[in-house]
Amino acid sequence: MNKDLWVYVEDAQDRPKNVGLELLSGPGRRLAEIQGGQLCAVVISDTTSETVKAAVSYGADKVYVVEGPEYKDYTTDAYTHAFCELVKKYQPTSILIGATVDGRDLGPRLACRLKTGLTADCTKLDIDEASGNVAWTRPAFGGNIMATILCPDHRPQIGTVRPGVFKLKAEPDFVRQAEIIWEDIHVVPEQIRTKILQTIREAADEMVDLEGAEIIVAGGRGLGKAENFFYVRELAEALGATVGSSRAAVDAGWISHVHQVGQTGKTVGPKLYIACGISGAVQHLVGIGGADKIVAINKDPEAPIFNIADYSIVGDLFQVLPAMTAEIKRLKNQK
Amino acid sequence: MKLLVCVKQVPDTTEIRIDPETNTLIRAGVPSIVNPFDTYALEVAARIKDECGGSITVISMGPQQAKNALTECLGVGADKAYLVSDRVFGGSDTLATSYILSGAIRAVEAKEGPFDVIFCGKQAIDGDTAQVGPEIAEHLDLPQVTYAVEVTAKEGSIVAKRENDDGYALIEMQTPCLVTVTKPAFDPRVPTIKSKLAAKKAEIAIITSEDMELDISRCGLKGSPTKVKKTFTPQVKKGGLRIVAEDGAAAGVKLAGLLVDAKVI
């Protein structure tokens, strides 16, 4: 057992998912220093060069790479096997995994195979001073309560961390060098017991990168019907923002789940979050805790979203949004 | 097909309030419900049973009171129910819980024959971990699909529609396998008066640590690698500026100006 801290940098088509880089540059570096070990990245894919480069530029001292055609798409069986073999060989003390859809599929499988503890969906990471263990803090009970969890007697201690909670701290340093360790781990096709028949991309004509978005304009139940997302899209376009939504709007069938923000959707950390007709159930608020500034527009003066908004308008969305969009276009043109 | 659905009784977290004086959860009066994601899992299983025939068994780990959750499931498609209950199981984290449940599943299979598909909700709304499903699959060495919204079955295999970051993927796997289910496009069925009455009369078998092969040191609080150090209520950010204007349009214009001035946009 060594003192190293590993960050899984998830790769999608030879591009790193943001959360891996967020974890390297922020909490990964901080925790690795306190633990007195190295900060290492793990990259698993069919082509890895760009993701490995990004991991180094965001602070990895070492990168463990598993490459092969069998890792083209994420599969539980192949990825768990590869990751587990790496852990058994190099024995890190802590592992951080982004709580993406695939990260949350991989994490429990890995922790269970290693017979160790896993803390899901963390929003805060520290080292417990008394014991030196990682103190994993996460929301539970739909965000009503926070719990700090330790894994004192088992190693590695593993946690998944919500995307967007930690901001990308450092600028990438492309001059940095790191040790790249290629591991020849392969699985035969029979070991992969799931077969992807088809992938269906939703909202293919628009980019829905909520987790990396600087500005998000989100719509909720207050929009009343699917067509009224038009007002949200107009404002988003004027701001160069990404469109988000509450669960209520997704459940109503007004917009695809890929736009959903909150406990069962994406966790976001934009500079500006504009909530339009979203009342602000605690499950939604959990997802926007990382936003720097929050704007709330709602006709109900009692809506809980106003308790956390930096700018509030109690009023009619359909008056506020078009006027605001027009004014933003005018002010931008002046610049 | 022989189907198993794992369910959990949870407090309805949407009803939970924080006591402003003590800053703790007010649990009194909060109703206990079947975890909503588990009701979706049961509905997905019930649709397969409608289509291909077979049977559905439900299993839950918890105190005696969790029988109510199982009874509810028996009213909406489940044929048989087991409660896994023992004092030594108390305080189990996800690894210990999945270990115990996988032992219980083996014990049920020894009596009733193997299950083709095991369903779980994507996560429980109290713990929100999404770990027990995949960990059961690992203990039982089964392939898994998580975040499924739809499952179709044919002899010997299933196809699950899985929600992912960009949309969906259709994934095929051979049975036996495990699927965790998130919110589908359809609502779970409701019981009829007849099915409700029958469910109330149905017997629920109890499985204790004596009924299965378990290493007790891997169960309960002691057998759990993760320990809760403390819980606290999240700090609530204070509300900020309320923009007042003669009408909505004027407020919108004012807000745009403020955001530009503050260099937010």
Image (cartoon, helix red, strand yellow):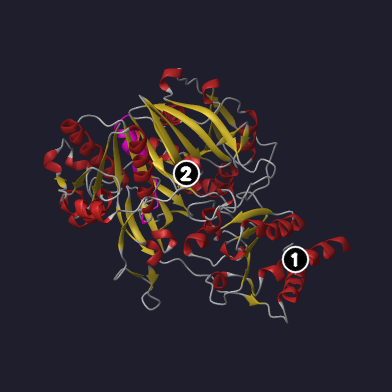
**Left or right: B133 as drawn, with respect to A304:** left
**Left or right: A217 as drawn, with respect to A115:** right
- SS of the residue at dot 2? loop
Q: Amino acid at mark 1?
A: Pro
Give me the residue at 72% from left, 75% from top.
Answer: B251
Where are the magenta residues, as a range? B126-141
Which image quarter is the N terminus of chain A in? Answer: top left
Q: Is residue B164 above or below residue A144?
A: above
Q: Amino acid at mark 2?
A: Gly
Question: Mark 1 or mark 2: which comes first in sequence?
Answer: 2
Percent coordinates x, y for residue B40 in the rendering: 39, 47
In the rendered image, the residue lying farthest to the left is B210
Q: Nearer the viewer, residue A329 or A286?
A: A329
Residue indicated by mark 2: A36
Give me the residue at 46% from left, 52% from top.
Answer: A122
Task: State yes or no: residue B134 in magenta.
Answer: yes
Percent coordinates x, y for residue A244 in the rendering: 61, 55
- SS of the residue at dot 1? helix
